[in-house]
Image (tube, grey):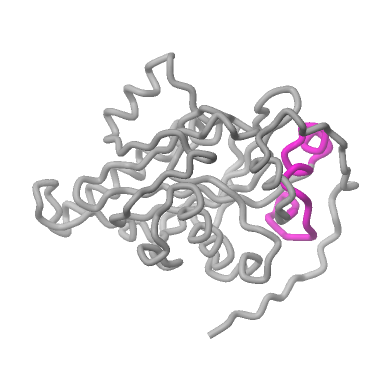
Amino acid sequence: MSTTVTQTAVEPPITILNPQVNLDAYDEEQVRLMEERCILINDKDEAYGEGSKKQCHLMESIRQGLLHRAFSVFLFRPSDGRLLLQKRADEKITFPGMWTNTCCSHPLYLRTELVEENQEGVRAAAVRKLPHELGIPASQLSPDIFTFLTRIHYLAPSDGLWGEHEIDYILFCSTDVDLELNPNEVSDARYVSKEELEGMFADSQNSFTPWFRLIARDLLFPWWDEMLEKSRAEGWDGKGNGKVRASVLENGPKTGEILKMV
């Protein structure tokens, strides 16, 4: 059954700029992706238009207040509750070579990805991007595997030219997947326990995306603990019995909020 997309007229909160910048020095495929059309929103997460990925990620636009919709997927292995991390490829224009959560990207200004009811558009975007970045077969994914936890609003510069300013939907899932990394997007991937991730954060040789640091600092570890604890209550023991289920976190206390994070 298809969902009708109805958008209430929302007044643009700013004058949308179109800064010009020379992209000749960057990877050809990543430059092409900069023309994708992101969903422009106000600080209440109300969509009012579209802008190129380039527009949305230039600090000149961000300083004027341009804000777009995004998502972050945290995928856990059901057998042991380990989190899948990725390391962004050096070809990436923003935050290259940094460790981050399983997948972080943007719903596009497409009919299927504009649907706000039950986060359908964001879920569809996650199903689109996980195969693109990590090579996960589409047959192993569906919109209903994701548990929506909250939205965060953050701003983070990458360098003097590029940055992020997003309202980011946090999606947990626990499912078994096969990986075939896209080297233009991801240079490495690994499953980690909580303790291993804490060790990675403590190692100054590792660099992490700012949104992942913020989420880990304030939200990830308590949610991870709760997910494992509730899964144990359902019979998971980490020794081959039961499974870790992200869905045990449904209807959490923050699902209706937009959390401003700095």
Picture coordinates of residue 82, whole percent (x, y)? 27, 42
Task: Please tell me whether residue 240 is drawn above or below residue 161 in the rendered image.
Answer: below
Task: Please tell me whether residue 175 is drawn above or below residue 192 in the rendered image.
Answer: below
Task: Please tell me whether residue 205 is drawn above or below residue 70 in the rendered image.
Answer: above
Instruction: Give the residue furthest to the top.
Output: 204
- Residue 140 falls inside the magenta stretch: no
Picture coordinates of residue 111, whole percent (x, y)? 67, 71
49 vs 125, left or right, is: right
- Residue 60 falls inside the magenta stretch: yes
Q: Residue at x 32, y 54 (%)?
A: 177
Q: Which residues are magenta?
A: 40-65
Q: Residue at x 35, y 40 (%)?
A: 222
Count up the numbered dots: 0
Which residue is at the front of the view, 182 or 229? 182
Q: Residue at x 40, y 63 (%)?
A: 141
Image quarter where the C terminus lies is top right
Residue 256 placement: quadrant: bottom right
Instruction: Give the residue furthest to the bottom.
Output: 1
172 vs 129, left or right, is: left
Which residue is at the front of the view, 153 or 66? 66
Picture coordinates of residue 18, whole percent (x, y)? 87, 43
Residue 203 placement: quadrant: top left
Picture coordinates of residue 240, whole percent (x, y)? 10, 52
Q: Residue at x 54, y 52 (%)?
A: 169
